[in-house]
Amino acid sequence: GHEDTVEDVQFCPSSAQQFCSVGDDSCLILWDARVGLAPVIK
């Protein structure tokens, strides 16, 4: 996940299971709740 504060989270309009988060660590991460705790793309 993030190494610093998460600043924003946006859910995918077509899938309630997918969302992106962006943090003060300058990372945008794509998450999929069906996969578990590991990010899909970092």
Image (tube, rainbow, N blue to C red):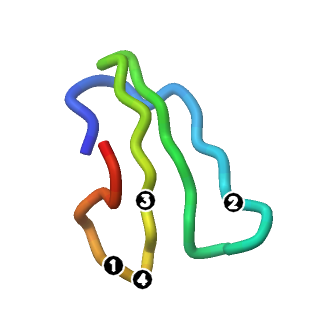
Left or right, residue 21 beside residue 13: left
Q: Name the residue carrying label 4.
A: 34
Left or right, residue 10 beside residue 17: right
Give me the residue at 44% from left, 69% from top. Answer: 32
Report how far apart the C-alphas of labels 2 and 3 lie in the structure: 10 Å
Disc marking residue 31: 3
Question: As rendered, which of 2 and 35 lies closer to the eye?
Answer: 35
Report how far apart the C-alphas of labels 2 and 4 lie in the structure: 14 Å
Report how far apart the C-alphas of labels 1 and 4 lie in the structure: 4 Å
User: What residue occupies the far front of the structure in this picture?
Assistant: 41
Q: Which element type, helix, strand or loop, lies under badge 3?
A: strand
Return the x and y of residue 39 as percentages of the image width and height.
30, 57
- Mark 2 residue type: Cys
Give me the residue at 65% from left, 46% from top. Answer: 10
Return the x and y of residue 17 as percentages of the image width and height.
57, 75
Q: Which tag, 1 or 2, sits closer to the chain's start?
A: 2
Return the x and y of residue 23 as percentages of the image width and height.
41, 25
Q: Name the residue carrying label 1.
A: 35
Q: Name the residue carrying label 2.
A: 12
Q: Are marks 2 and 3 in contact (CB under 8 Å)?
A: no
Report how far apart the C-alphas of labels 1 and 3 lie in the structure: 8 Å
